[in-house]
Image (cartoon, coloured by chain):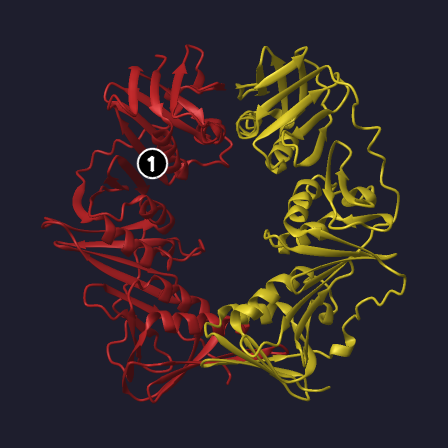
Chain colours: A yellow, B red
């Protein structure tokens, strides 16, 4: 094994570690899978961590300032100890060196750390899938917002694995994200950058997508997406995240969205969110009742033996008949927290149809559904 | 039961609740002990919570602005629900009203909450101990700092109950706080405001003292302390905290403090703290080795099969012979975090004597001990 020798700024190293450690499987009994693969190349340092579902690569290019590669080579370092030690070093420059016995020496200021490294050839290699991938590009800030809105609505139960994923459908010039846990549903549509030659569908584990979204910049950057038969890759400013795909057919959402409404109103989002959160405090099993009438939405809940609560928010616009319906207050809170706009439009299509919630903003093409709860009163 | 009716500003109510809920015993199977006693009097509202060990009273005086008492009376409200509901109300003014059936109605803006209250006569009454208390006054900011330094060193194991307490010794014009868990010890001395006629000792549960210190202002205020046979009371800006005393004899610390030293040095506190925290990351069982020589303190640790680490800090002053000793790195970290000064003085009195650490500041009369760990190398 060729011993590496690199100099790296503490902040650059911490930044790379913070990203890749998201893919480290700290509970894996095989030590190498608790490690971070470090490869020093002539053009920079590549940090890689991988679990069965996700691989994250962070590249720190050689620039003569924050990264200097003095000798190329590779090693795998135990993630937890390495991260903990680097966090506690306070000097700006860090020297990493390995020897033939795979001992990693970290020098910084008055500190000298020696850690037992592992053989980089034992690290799982990145998939070299040969099928021609389909590619598209998307604005990073929009992608981050879309994933935040949609991914939290996916199921966390493994009973139906497809529902733990987000369905990504690409249709020439737009991309649609859909997630549902069977009780609520979120969908968001984004324009792709440039035309896309092909159409495709993929189901991506929601938790991978969510971790990836946290690494995306809110700046006006571009994220490249590459979809091949078994994997999806995202690439943005020095980071590559590869996720497994979930096999199976995602349920069709078109049947779930009611097409005609008995009542529709708009309401200030922050105001409605505060009222829902307040009423949910006393909601037995989180069930709150919504009663819309005369440009006012009443919210009610009760917990037997403890008490009840009533709240009201004014509606800015209302058409159709009033209605009364019960929903899960926590689910409604999740939707309102993630709808990212100042007003929302709420549609009621009857006592057994899901409530439809839309951001009242023509620039955000998102839609949320929440199924009502049957109650005896 | 006389039904109360009060108007109170949300911030004033939240502030009182945040203090008194510290004494609510949320796991107590008796509902009334999970409650907050609210008494509306002509001069203001008194909030009280109490568990077996501590009682906290917060007074919100009637001032016509933030507190208006329209009808005096009392009730006990379930703490958790009440606190959660108030937290979620966003309007500035809150109206609290009870009826003959002890239903508490909370009105604020568009919200109306009804909670089942409990009979205030069932609430444990505050101790009306008749023994003449001994009184003293102390600067609140100094008291806060002293408790922070000392209380964290008390034992958390119930094996020797006296060690879960802080010994408070009052000797005419000064007061001494001492805590030890048998391995480390902290003591701090403060001047009392004015002369005190009597001397006394009391052992106060460290966790009560610590909760109380968090309520103390860092401003230049005064805290009154009253010690009676079974209780200690603290009073400061509208808050009264009463704690049980721990029975028993606190170990004498005079025997524990070494009187002659083989080596003594001073060192920058932040620098030493950073080095100890760094080295402790790789310390098996938290054991780190300190080696002092030639105005340099080396710190070393190792975890078998993982690696080792070495760090060094320069000493600003050193007298006597060099030494090598092993200590618990977490304990040393606790001491250094709480010593509240820019430099510390460290004294070594031999391989089996505790290390002495003193703030290098004539205004802070504190002393910490940490017992060395025997190692085989």
Q: Chain of mark 1?
A: B
Location of residue A80 by image quarter: bottom right
Residue A138 at x, y percent in the picture: 71, 51
Location of residue A180 by image quarter: top right
Give the residue number, with chain letter if any, for mark 1.
B56
Q: Residue at x 77, y 42 (%)?
A: A176
Q: Residue at x 73, y 20 (%)?
A: A374
Q: Secondary structure at mark 1?
A: strand
Residue B339 at x, y percent in the picture: 31, 64
Residue A294 at x, y percent in the picture: 59, 10
Q: Residue at x 35, y 15 (%)?
A: B5
Task: Using the image as rendered, state which of residue A284 and residue A354 is in the foreground.
Answer: A354
- Left or right of B147 on screen, residue B135: left
Vertical placement of A252 versus A239: above or below? above
- Left or right of B259 on screen, residue B304: right
Vertical placement of B1 versus B241: above or below? above
Vertical placement of B292 versus B206: above or below? below
Q: Residue at x 64, y 69 (%)?
A: A79
Determine if residue A148 is in view. Answer: yes
Residue A212 at x, y percent in the picture: 68, 54
Residue at the right extreme, as displayed: A131
Task: Using the image as rendered, state which of residue B182 and residue A50 is in the foreground.
Answer: A50
At label 1, counting other C-alpha atoms closer than 10 Å, the crowd grade (few under 14, some 14-19, many 20 or more) is many
């Amino acid at each position: 094994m060729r011993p590496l020798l690199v100099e790296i700024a503490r902040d650059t190293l911490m930044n790379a570690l913070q990203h890749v450690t998201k893919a480290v499987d700290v509970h894996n009994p095989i030590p190498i899978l608790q490690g971070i693969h470090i490869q020093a190349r002539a053009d920079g340092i590549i940090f890689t961590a991988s679990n069965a579902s996700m691989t994250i690569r962070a590249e720190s290019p050689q620039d003569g300032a924050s990264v200097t590669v003095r000798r190329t080579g590779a090693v795998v370092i135990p993630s937890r100890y390495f991260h903990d030690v680097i966090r506690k070093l306070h000097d700006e420059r860090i020297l990493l060196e390995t020897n033939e016995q795979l001992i990693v020496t970290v020098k910084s200021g008055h500190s000298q750390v020696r850690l037992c490294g592992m053989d980089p050839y034992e690290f799982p290699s990145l998939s070299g899938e040969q099928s021609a991938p389909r590619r598209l590009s998307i604005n990073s800030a929009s992608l981050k917002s879309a994933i935040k809105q949609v991914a939290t609505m996916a199921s966390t139960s493994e009973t139906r694995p497809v529902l733990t994923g987000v369905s990504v459908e690409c249709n020439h010039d737009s991309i649609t994200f859909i997630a549902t846990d069977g009780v609520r549903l979120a969908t968001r549509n984004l324009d792709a950058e440039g035309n896309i030659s092909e159409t495709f569908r993929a189901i991506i584990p929601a938790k991978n997508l969510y971790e990836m979204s946290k690494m995306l910049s809110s700046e006006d950057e571009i994220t490249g997406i590459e979809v091949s038969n078994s994997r999806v890759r995202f690439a943005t400013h020095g980071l590559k995240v590869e996720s497994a795909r979930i096999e199976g057919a995602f349920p069709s959402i078109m049947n779930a969205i009611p097409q005609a409404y008995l009542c529709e109103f708009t309401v200030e989002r922050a105001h409605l969110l505060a009222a829902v959160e307040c009423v949910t405090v006393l909601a037995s099993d989180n069930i709150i009742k919504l009663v819309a009438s005369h440009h006012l939405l009443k919210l009610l809940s009760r917990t037997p033996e403890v008490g009840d609560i009533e709240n009201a928010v004014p509606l800015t616009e209302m058409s159709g008949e009033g209605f009364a319906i019960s929903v899960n207050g926590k689910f409604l809170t999740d939707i309102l927290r993630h709808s990212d706009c100042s007003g929302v439009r709420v549609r009621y299509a009857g006592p057994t149809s899901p409530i439809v919630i839309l951001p009242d903003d023509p620039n955000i093409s998102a839609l949320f559904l929440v199924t009502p709860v049957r109650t005896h009163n």
